[in-house]
Image (cartoon, rainbow, N blue to C red):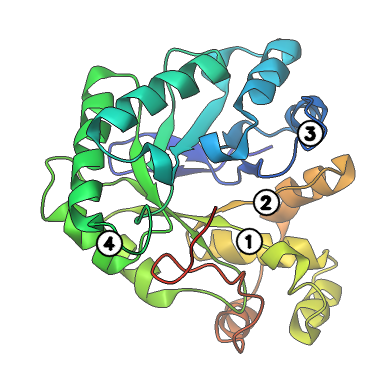
Amino acid sequence: MQQETFKLSNGLKFPKIGFGTYKTTLNNDAEIIELAIKSGYKYFDTASFYGNEQFIAQAIANSGISRKEIFLASKLWKSEMGYENAKHALEQTLRNLGTDYLDLYMIHWPRPDLKADWKRIDIETWRAMQEFYESGKVRAIGLSNFLPHHIENIIQNCEIKPMVNQLEIHPGHTQESAVNYCKAHDILVQAWSPIGRARVLNDELILELAEKYQASPAQICVKFCVQKNIMPLPKSSNPERMRENLESLNVNISQEDFWRLDTMPPLGWGGEHPDRERLS
């Protein structure tokens, strides 16, 4: 399972489907992550903000799987932006995850708040990210929730371009401008909330295609991302659904049906926008 890969601009290959861990350890344990590993996931997306890095480390240790076979991605939070703050943030994340390197490290949001000089802060933070990459502490560096104007600020002031950008993407919310910008700059797009936090699963087109392809509605959404050359990061606490999401790779959506999904009316947006929302 998961033999297919996405290739980053630096040659690093990621599995085509990863596992999102936001709010997956609400009981402060590693059980859900262990189930995901047993289900076949190799790529785990976390963040300092999620508060679960220690539990992911525990699950990997309990699995007996070599660290080299696992892909670990994390993000620094708004309060950790800036050159010195970023250095401290990475060291804490490495300690939490019980590892001496990350496969991917990202800036979680482009703005620490709506009043800060975000362009300067992003450039300072990215300077630290470049050092992490050059030192080997991080195998790839990227962004999360950055839109074209945020990314352009970094590209115009960097030596190493971002390799990944993570966005909310699912049928009904495709963010074409941001996705096209990333593809033009050889930045792999990852999709958080690829099934729209279940908001889109009862849409009539999703249900129609699920029946047509003998797949679940979630599988239609996950494979839609893959066919757009976007890496989905679905999450679930149910082992059957975990495996089902991985098996989305076996679903082959026709070009006509893909276009229908790609042009759905707006649906299921999570309500978080980096230039408008203040997240705690």
Task: Look at mark 3 in the image and give the residue it sits on.
Answer: 39
Task: Look at mark 4 in the image and give the residue it sits on.
Answer: 150
Number of numbered discs present? 4
Q: Residue at x 37, y 49 (%)?
A: 143
Q: Residue at x 59, y 85 (%)?
A: 266
Q: Amino acid at mark 2?
A: Pro
Task: Look at mark 1 in the image and give the residue it sits on.
Answer: 194
Considering only order in the chain, which callout, 2 or 4, is on the residue closer to the N terminus? 4
- The answer to whether residue 26 is visible is yes
Residue 255 at x, y = what percent?
57, 78
Instruction: Tell whether label 2 touches label 1 (CB within 8 Å).
Output: yes
For this rendering, which residue is in front, 37 or 150? 150
For marks 4 and 2, give the CA distance.
25 Å
SS assignment at label 4: helix
Give the number of the mark in front: 3 or 4. 4
Task: Answer with left or right where residue 237 lies relative to residue 86.
Answer: right
Residue 185's quadrant in the figure? bottom left
- The crowding category of the residue bearing disc 2, from other C-alpha atoms within 10 Å (few below 14, some 14 to 19, many at least 20), is many
Task: Look at mark 2 in the image and give the residue it sits on.
Answer: 234
Residue 99 at x, y = what percent?
50, 14
